[in-house]
Amino acid sequence: MILVEDAVILKGNKDGLNVVINSNSFNDFDQLASALIEKLSKGSKFYRGAEIKIITDLKQLNERDRDKLKDILFDEFMIKECVYEDISSNREKIFKGIYEGKTKFYRKTIRSGQIVDYPGNIVIIGDVNSGAEVYAGGNVIVFGALKGNVYAGRGGNNDAVIAAITLKPQILSIGEIATRSPDEDDTPHYPEIALIKDGSIIVEPYKNMKMY
């Protein structure tokens, strides 16, 4: 289960407040609205009269829901100006390279049956066991053994990478390309990194990578 703090992210700037909502984390509009209210309630006195930009998957938020959300923000927090931006138009700009973008750290092992889903980069300090699933809008870096299913660059970001101390996932996907791990048990004893080159996913020793 994805926590509210992971599904709703607040970022203040000189123009107002940006709210990034992972709409896939909610079963319906009411759940999404409740999560947003809970998040904003922690600093409600700072948002009065502010301009807010909601960045989300607009395909999952129809015009009626958008208008309803504007009314809720006005009634609950006196937010008068609310605009929307489609997250799909923002992904490539945020996660164009290896270093850019929001990053979530998980200091634990992701066990079989568990799912990690974050719209930015994911760093896991621990293992990803067989049967676990990791989904990221950006890169996935694992300081341990990666043996589950991993999906980086969701939304079509073919510049994303997947790296691990032991890289042996069941399914490995970057952007729009996916592959399965070979059956042989010959696992190298050095960190590896997976990336897309010439339209295919390749795996290289991490020590050979040149980072610019």
Image (tube, rainbow, N blue to C red):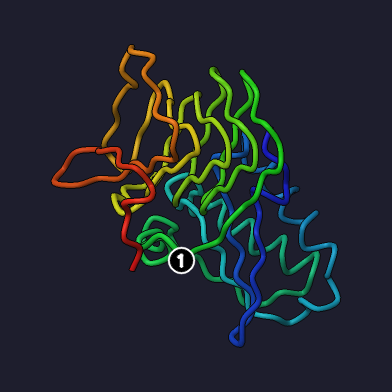
Q: Nearer the viewer, residue 46 or 119?
A: 119
Q: Dot 1 lies on which element? A: loop
Q: Amino acid at mark 1?
A: Glu
Left or right of 159 in this view: 135: right
Residue at the (64%, 70%) spot, across then down: 11
Q: Residue at x 33, y 69 (%)?
A: 212
Which residue is painted at 43% across and 65% down in the image? 94
Q: Is residue 181 or residue 52 the one in the foreground?
A: 181
49 in relation to 32, above or below: below
Left or right of residue 167: residue 131: right
Left or right, residue 172 beside residue 165 = left
The answer to which image quadrant residue 103 occupies is bottom right
- In percent of width and height, residue 192 lies at 39, 40
- Across and down, in percent, residue 181 comes to 34, 21
| Corner quadrant of residue 124 | top right
Q: Of 185 and 46, which appears nearest the observer?
A: 185
Judging depth in this view, the residue of 68 and 15 nearest the camera is 15
